[in-house]
Image: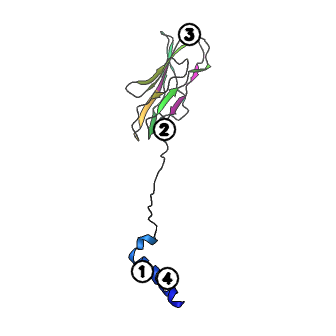
């Protein structure tokens, strides 16, 4: 009996010695790495985020004009933007007409008549580079004496 046990054990040892891979599983290991980088924008304001602009009055043309201070926009993607319709917070007349623009220093990126929100428009940003913009408003039809106040919202969107 002892001889049979010895020979069975011996056969197993001989088998592992001759074919070591036969006793072990063939495995591979695949590692996948992934990440999501979120969109990020930062803003700088020459005159604060909620700026009040003093409009200039041209009596001969009955026109009010004004420009915001510089708004610096830096994003890690090419953002788009919209300008809201011009909200008349206080005006002694009805029927003014508006010209509203977002300007990058050399041209109007967005221009609208101010009666409704503008279309979403690419700002032409370069990743990580600050670009300076101003919001320019012209109001025609300021015929009556009084205080005029308007509000516009700039919204920056991911493209």
Real-space Cα separation, disc 3 to disc 4, in angstroms: 112 Å
Q: Residues within 10 Å of mark 2 (few under 14, many from 20)?
A: few
Question: Which residue is the site of mark 1?
Answer: 14
- Could you tell me if the residues under marks 1 and 3 are in contact, i.e. CB atoms within 8 Å? no
Real-space Cα separation, disc 2 to disc 1, in angstroms: 75 Å
Q: Secondary structure at mark 4?
A: helix
Q: Residues within 10 Å of mark 1 (few under 14, many from 20)?
A: few
Looking at the rendered image, the disc whose residue lies closer to the viewer, 4 or 2, is 4
- Could you tell me if the residues under marks 4 and 1 are in contact, i.e. CB atoms within 8 Å? no
- Where the N terminus falls, by quadrant? bottom right
Question: Which residue is the site of mark 2?
Answer: 43
Relative image position of residue 37 (x, y in whole percent): 47, 46
Real-space Cα separation, disc 4 to disc 2, in angstroms: 79 Å
Looking at the rendered image, the disc whose residue lies closer to the viewer, 1 or 3, is 1
Closer to the N terminus: mark 2 or mark 1?
A: 1
Looking at the rendered image, the disc whose residue lies closer to the viewer, 2 or 1, is 1
Closer to the N terminus: mark 2 or mark 3?
A: 2
Q: Secondary structure at mark 2?
A: strand
The residue lying toward the viewer, choosing from 38 and 48, is 38
Badge count: 4
Looking at the rendered image, the disc whose residue lies closer to the viewer, 3 or 4, is 4
Q: Is residue 142 left or right of residue 134?
A: right
Numbered badge on residue 69:
none
Q: Is residue 13 left or right of residue 150?
A: left
Q: Secondary structure at mark 1?
A: helix
Q: Residue at left 53%, top 90%?
A: 2
- Could you tell me if the residues under marks 4 and 2 are in contact, i.e. CB atoms within 8 Å? no
Q: Residues within 10 Å of mark 3 (few under 14, many from 20)?
A: some
Question: Which residue is the site of mark 4?
Answer: 8
Q: Is residue 106 left or right of residue 146?
A: left
Real-space Cα separation, disc 4 to disc 1, in angstroms: 10 Å
């Amino acid at each position: 009996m002892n001889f049979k046990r010895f020979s069975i054990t011996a056969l197993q040892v001989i088998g592992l010695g001759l074919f070591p891979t036969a006793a072990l599983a063939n495995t591979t290991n695949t590692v996948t790495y992934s990440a999501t980088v979120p969109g990020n924008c930062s803003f700088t304001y020459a005159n604060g985020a909620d700026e009040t602009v003093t409009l200039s009055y041209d009596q001969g043309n009955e026109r009010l004009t004004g420009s915001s201070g510089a708004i610096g926009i830096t994003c890690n993607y090419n953002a788009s933007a919209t300008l809201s319709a011009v909200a008349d917070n206080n005006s002694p007349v009805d029927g003014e007409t508006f010209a509203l623009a977002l300007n990058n220093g050399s041209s109007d990126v967005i221009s609208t008549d101010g009666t409704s929100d503008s279309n979403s428009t690419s700002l032409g940003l370069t990743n990580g580079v600050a670009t300076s913009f101003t919001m320019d408003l012209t109001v025609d039809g300021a015929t009556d004496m009084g205080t005029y106040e308007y509000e516009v919202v700039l919204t920056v969107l991911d493209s």
